[in-house]
Structure formats: structure tokens, C-alpha cells
Image: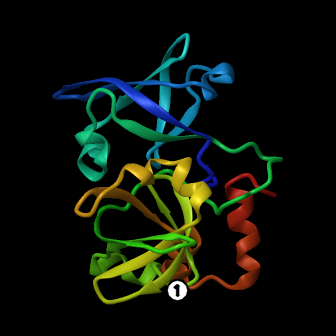
Amino acid sequence: MFTGIIEEIGVVKGINKSSSGAVLKIKTEKIHVDVKLGDSIAVNGACLSVTAVNINILSFDVIPETLKRTTLTDLKANDPVNLERSVKADARIGGHFITGHIDYKGRIDDIIKNQTSIGFNVSLPSEFSKFVVGKGSVALDGASLTIATVSKDNFTVYLIPHTFRNTTFGMKKKGDFINVETDIIGKYVAKDKVKASDFQDILKEYGYM
């Protein structure tokens, strides 16, 4: 489980693909100091398990389904990636609950720049539209963001300068694809029409109570 507060921008040192998936190697400057084998790390929002630690180089095995569903399949050496370690049970939740299970690859349809923020207009397939609502939460490449507006085919989020500078969003351009994870709470509501009291069970399931 993650919160969508990006800890650092890592750098891809290599990705070796095979019929069984891929081995991804990422160089870090900060988070490697207390990472252990088997730890979960969100890489551009996708939850991956650490399979090797070589000083500040972390290795991950990526299964074919993850490569198919996410933008990790397009990574190459020296590409930047957003990194976040899994949240501790006693930590403050600065963003929102994120599982690291990517729903789809969204296309950046437009980038809106103004004096105080930068907006990203992201494509929205119809099958996911019921999980995306104005003022709700969404994770884009692992970053927790608030949805400003929603239309039939896309939605818009706005980033403050701090988020823009400390994530890979500053390197994105129109037409690029980005990992999208819709809000887990919205999925529960849509599937089971849970009552407010049922949210306690959801929080307990994910270790927050």
C-alpha cells in the first residue's frame, strides 16, 4: 500500500526482457538505504518487489501482465521514474490509499500551463469512468492527485510547482502515456455499494486500523 507522495526520482540502469517478463534495474539516491529483499516499491505507480540490492541499484522482476498493462514496458536506460516505498502502518497518509495495481495506460491529451499550476488532461476509457469523479483522487505514475474536471473522454488534474519539480511530470509532453490507478475506495463503492460503516472493514483489511 502506498500514499502517492513521491520520495525521489530514480534512474533506469537497465531493463532486460524475456518471454517470462523483465528484470528492471533502478538507481536510487535515497530510498535504498533501508530497502530489503522482498520490499514493495512503487515504480511509476506500479507495485514491484525488490529482488536484489547492489549498493544503490535495486532490481525488480516484472511479470508479462504488468508489462502489458503499464508503461514500464517502454522504459529504457537513463529514463527517470517516480519511486515510493510502501507506507508504514503508523505513518501519516499525505495522499490517498494506493495499491500499486495499475488500471490502464492513459494518454496525455493536453498540458495546460498557467502562473500558479500546470494541468494535465488525461484520456479516460469508458470502463473506468465510474471510478473518476471531480474532486476525487487518482494516482498518475504513482503520484496522488486531485481530479479537477471530468468529461466524457478525459479528466484533468493540476500540479503545484513543488510536485511538478519533484516528479517525472516535468519531463512529460503531450502524447506521452502515463500509468493510471483509480481510487480504491471508489472501486469498492461501485462494486458493493458499501455503507459508510463498511469503510472500517476496508481500512482494517489494508492494515490502517
- Measuring from the top left, give residue 30's x and y in whole percent: 63, 27
- Does residue 58 appear to the left or right of 89 in the view shown? left
The residue furthest left is: 19
Residue at (73, 52) in percent of width and height: 207
As displayed, is residue 71 above or below residue 175? Answer: above
- Does residue 88 appear to the left or right of 36 in the view shown? right
Task: Kindly identify which residue carries mark 1.
Answer: 134
- Quadrant, the C terminus: bottom right
- Judging depth in this view, the residue of 172 and 53 nearest the camera is 172
Tell me the kind of residue under disc 1. Gly
Mark 1 secondary-structure assignment: loop
As displayed, is residue 187 above or below residue 180? Answer: below
For the question of whether residue 98 can be seen, the reply is: no
The residue furthest bottom is: 152
For the question of whether residue 17 can be seen, the reply is: yes
Residue 103, quarter of picture: bottom left
- Measuring from the top left, give residue 179's x and y in whole percent: 37, 56
As displayed, is residue 62 above or below residue 37? Answer: below
Q: How is the image coloured?
A: rainbow
- Measuring from the top left, give residue 159's x and y in whole percent: 54, 66
- Measuring from the top left, give residue 158's x and y in whole percent: 51, 72
